[in-house]
Image (cartoon, rainbow, N blue to C red):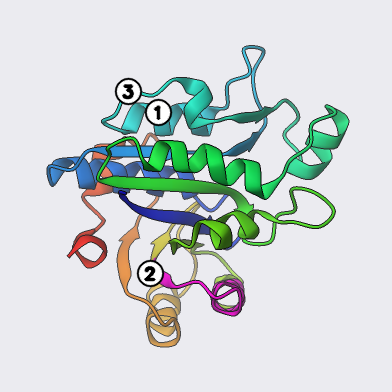
Amino acid sequence: MSKTWFVTGTDTGVGKTAVSCGLLAAAARAGMRTAAVKPVAAGCDERGHNEDALYLQGAMTETLDYSQVNPVALTAAIAPHIAAQQEGKNLQAARLVGLCRGVMSGGADFVLIEGAGGWRVPINPRETLADLAVQLQVGVIMVVGMRLGCINHALLTAEAIRRDGLHLAAWVANQPGPRMDCHDENLDTLRHLLPAPLLGDVPLLPDWQAADLSRHLDIGLLVE
C-alpha cells in the first residue's frame, strides 16, 4: 500500500488544491509515482468536472480516469451535504473509503486525498469528511490559510484531528491573498504551537504551476 495522507484546510479557500499539486510535483521530482483523489467536489461544470479535481489529475504522475480522481461530483458550489441532498445523492463515508482505497492500492508511492473545505464539513446528517480520514487511518496534512484568524483556526483544527485519533503529520502555511500583517510573527507562533513540522511557507502565486509551488515545499519530512 502506498504512503497516503489526507489533506485538510483550516477553512475553505485556503489553497488545499494548490498545495496538494505542489506536494505531488515535489514527490514526482523525488522519483515517486503519485496519485490523488478528491472524493467529493461541489461546484462542477456541465461535464460534471470540478476545477480542483482537474488540477490534481494534471499534477499526478499516474493516469487515472476523472471518475477515479473525483468519484462524487456535485453541481452546486455549496456545502457537499446540501448539494448531495438537492441532487438526490447519498454520501456515506464507508463508500468513499472503498473508492479511495482503490486508488491507494493502484501502485503509486505517494497518494493524497483532498478533503472539501475544513475538517468538519458534513457529508450527511451523521458523518463529516473527517470520518473518511478516520476510517482510512491515514496521517493528515493541514493547509493553514495565512490570514487574520489563522492561529485560532489552525489550533482548533489540529485539536479536532488529534481528538479524532489521527496524527497531524505536517502543515503548510499558504498565502491565499495579499500578505497578512505580521505574517512572520504569526508563522512563528504557529511553529511554536502546532505539534507537527512545517513543510513550507508558500507565497501568493496568482498564476501558479505545481512545479513553482513545489519549490517552496520540503517533503523530506513526510517521506524519510
Residue 77 visible, this angle: yes
Q: Quadrant of the C terminus?
A: bottom left
Q: Label 2 sits on what residue type?
A: Ala
Residue 135 in the image, given as x and y percentages of width and height? 57, 59
Residue 127 in the image, given as x and y percentages of width and height? 75, 56
Cα distance in 3D space between marks 2 and 1: 23 Å
Vertical side of 197 occupied by 105: above or below: above
Quick check: marks 3 and 2 in contact, CB under 8 Å? no
Cα distance in 3D space between marks 3 and 2: 27 Å
Q: Residue furthest top?
A: 47
The label number, if any, that marks residue 57 in the structure image: 1
Q: Residue at x 64, y 48 (%)?
A: 94
Q: Residue at x 65, y 24 (%)?
A: 44
Tell me the magenta residue range: 153-170
Residue 43 in the image, given as x and y percentages of width and height? 67, 30
**In the image: residue 40, left or right of residue 109:** right
Look at the image and say whether residue 162 sits in the magenta stretch. Answer: yes
Q: Residue at x 35, y 46 (%)?
A: 111
Q: Label 3 sits on what residue type?
A: Thr
Q: Earlier in the sequence, mark 3 or mark 2?
A: 3
Q: Residue at x 30, y 49 (%)?
A: 2
**In the image: residue 173, left or right of residue 92:** left
Residue 12 visible, this angle: no
Pair 1/3: label in front: 3
Q: Which residue is mark 3?
A: 63
Q: Which residue is mark 2?
A: 169
Q: Label 1 sits on what residue type?
A: Gln
Q: Earlier in the sequence, mark 1 or mark 3?
A: 1
Which element is circle 2 on?
strand
The label number, if any, that marks residue 5 in the structure image: none
Residue 156 in the image, given as x and y percentages of width and height? 62, 77
